[in-house]
Amino acid sequence: MARIVLFTRTGFHHTCFINRLQERFQIACVVREAYPGDHQRRKISLTTAKKSFGLNSINGIRDIFFLKKFHETYSAGFGYHPALKDCLRAPFDAVVERRGTEYLNIECGGINSNEFASFIRDLRPDVIAVLGSSVIKTHIISIPSMAIINIHSGLSPYYRGTWSYGWPIVNNEPEYIGVTLHHINPGIDAGDIIYQTRPLLEGRDDLNTIFLKVISEGMELAVKAIEELSETGGIKSYRQPPDTGLLYLSKDFNADAARLCLANLQSGIIRRYNSEKKARDSGTRLYGYVPPCIHNKPEGEKRAGGGPGGA
């Protein structure tokens, strides 16, 4: 049986990732990396404000308040949303700690420290599965004996980097909404692809449900890959074609992109995509394609409400 370690963060979807994999495997260690502290977030906000005030202070202030509201509304992984219950397949409000598993919390960026590398080497992992950590450096990547794999919330190589489920909506390319499970290398979402899929989308989906469907499908791809690695010691993968697709970084996201994303959703981009799905999907090659397994509720069925269970 493979010795498995998880690297992740502290949001609801990260907690679900831990619990989902613990349902299927004995996990040696769960590592939860913190996000940047409040003082750093305030510093980033202040920097954004100063840049905005430089050319057009009124529009700059409007953009800052719009983005604040946008992040508060469309952050289902970090704040409670009814779709968490509909889309995620395991408990998301608390880690269900298991006997024999070590649980470690580390500071932001600590995942690449020499001290942490020594700790992980001593665990002698066969597989490290990653969702949402800082960019991992080479001396950590080389530790597991079988693989270090990552869930990327986009279809590589077409959309890499951050917010990869949102940029296809901005660019009117909903056929690129999907998830990639790939080996980690020193690039950004550039490692060899193991599996890819597209979630089943509905016309009523917003950014929260789209994100949660993407991530939930990604967890199932991780389960499938770890099962295969445990059984055979290896797994087929596909090298990403060079110089293909788009790489978006955090600095590329702004209020204009967020507004266009919401406007395209409001205009019915998902319904139009579903009416043309076969033709639009056929124009894009996916690597290691696996059919989606998180099925939608019927369009007329109301989503569950209430607060997070057990919180």
Image (cartoon, rainbow, N blue to C red):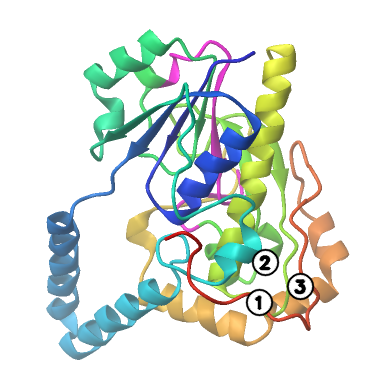
**Pointer 3 with pointer 2, Cβ within 8 A:** yes
User: Of callouts 1 and 2, which one flags the residue occurring earlier in the amino acid sequence?
Assistant: 2
In the displayed orientation, state which residue is furthest to the bottom.
58
In the displayed orientation, state which residue is furthest to the right.
278
Q: Which residue position holds label 2?
A: 174
The mark lying in front, picked from 1 and 3, is 1
Q: Which residue position holds label 3?
A: 273
Q: Position of residue 243 (x, y in %)?
A: 57, 40
Q: Is residue 288 visible?
A: yes
* Residue at the (81%, 48%) spot, across then down: 291
Q: Amino acid at mark 3?
A: Tyr
Q: Position of residue 265 (x, y in %)?
A: 60, 80
Q: Position of residue 278 (x, y in %)?
A: 87, 63
User: Which segment is the magenta one?
Assistant: 141-163
Q: Is residue 157 magenta?
A: yes
Q: Amino acid at mark 2?
A: Pro
Please give left or right for residue 267 compared with residue 298 in the image. left
